[in-house]
Image (cartoon, rainbow, N blue to C red):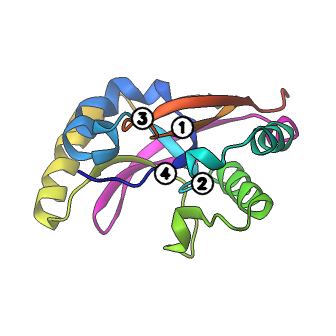
Amino acid sequence: MNMPIESALVILVPEAEALVESFRNQYDPSAAVGIPAHVTVLYPFKAPGDLTPDVIHSLEQLFAGFPGFQAVFTELQRFPNVLYLSPEPADPFRLLIKTVAAHFPETLPYGGEFTEIIPHLTVAQVNEPQRLEEIGAAFARAAKSRLPIPTRVREIVLMDNGSGYWQIRHRFALKRV
């Protein structure tokens, strides 16, 4: 597979891995290329070669002023071809995404493909509606008594696929509250 060389800013959610990992490994192409359970902050971000020390410093400054927060992943929801866990509250995620996008206006969230920002943790991406229903039912069985999943958002991670596999390039601490 020929993928573009790019980067992303994400919030990793390791607390969700135990529940979502097997589903993501089977049904989310991003898992196969090294991206753990996450909520996207800004993708695509910049080409890895454009991640200069000035860009890194700018991100450090931006995130150092943004307060960390707590959230909980409460329920499975659906886009047309995607099953995802929704965080509550969603507003801190939305504000973070909008803040970063405003700071880097040349990099629109999701490449500008979607007008509404809906923070989410992808569980499965499948183009067959019936198959997505089956996966959703299996996930509901697996998730019984395992939801909600609490998390504390303390950092933003910069990942890139310059090596052909997505890897963490930098971690940015959020402001402690």
Residue for badge 3: 163
Viewer-nearest of labels 4 and 3?
Answer: 3
Viewer-nearest of labels 4 and 1?
Answer: 1
Q: Earlier in the sequence, mark 4 or mark 2?
A: 2
Viewer-nearest of labels 4 and 2?
Answer: 2
Instruction: Say which element carries label 1.
Output: strand
Residue for badge 1: 159
Relative depth, front residue between 156 and 70: 156
Q: Residue type at mark 1?
A: Met
Image quadrant occupied by the C terminus: top right
Alpha carbon distance from label 4 to label 1: 18 Å
Instruction: Say which element carries label 3.
Output: loop
Instruction: Say which element carries label 2.
Output: loop
Q: Using the rendered image of the protein, determine whether residue 144 is visible from the camera's viewpoint.
A: no
> How would you rate the neighbour count of disc 3 (Cα within 10 Å): few for under 14, some for 14-19, many for 20 or more?
few
**What residue is rendered at 53% in x and 29% in y?**
168
Relative to 58, say whether 127 is above or below.
Answer: below
Main secondary structure of the magenta stretch: strand
Q: Earlier in the sequence, mark 4 or mark 3?
A: 4
> How would you rate the neighbour count of disc 1 (Cα within 10 Å): few for under 14, some for 14-19, many for 20 or more?
many
**What residue is rendered at 60% in x and 53% in y?**
46
Q: Earlier in the sequence, mark 2 or mark 3?
A: 2
Alpha carbon distance from label 1 to label 3: 11 Å
Q: Residue type at mark 3?
A: Ser
The reply to whether discs 1 and 2 touch (Cβ–Cβ < 8 Å) is: no
Image location (x, y in percent) of residue 77: 38, 56
**What residue is rendered at 43% in x and 36% in y?**
166
Q: Residue type at mark 2?
A: Phe
Q: Residue type at mark 4?
A: His
Image disc number at residue 113: none
Residue for badge 2: 45
Residue for badge 4: 120
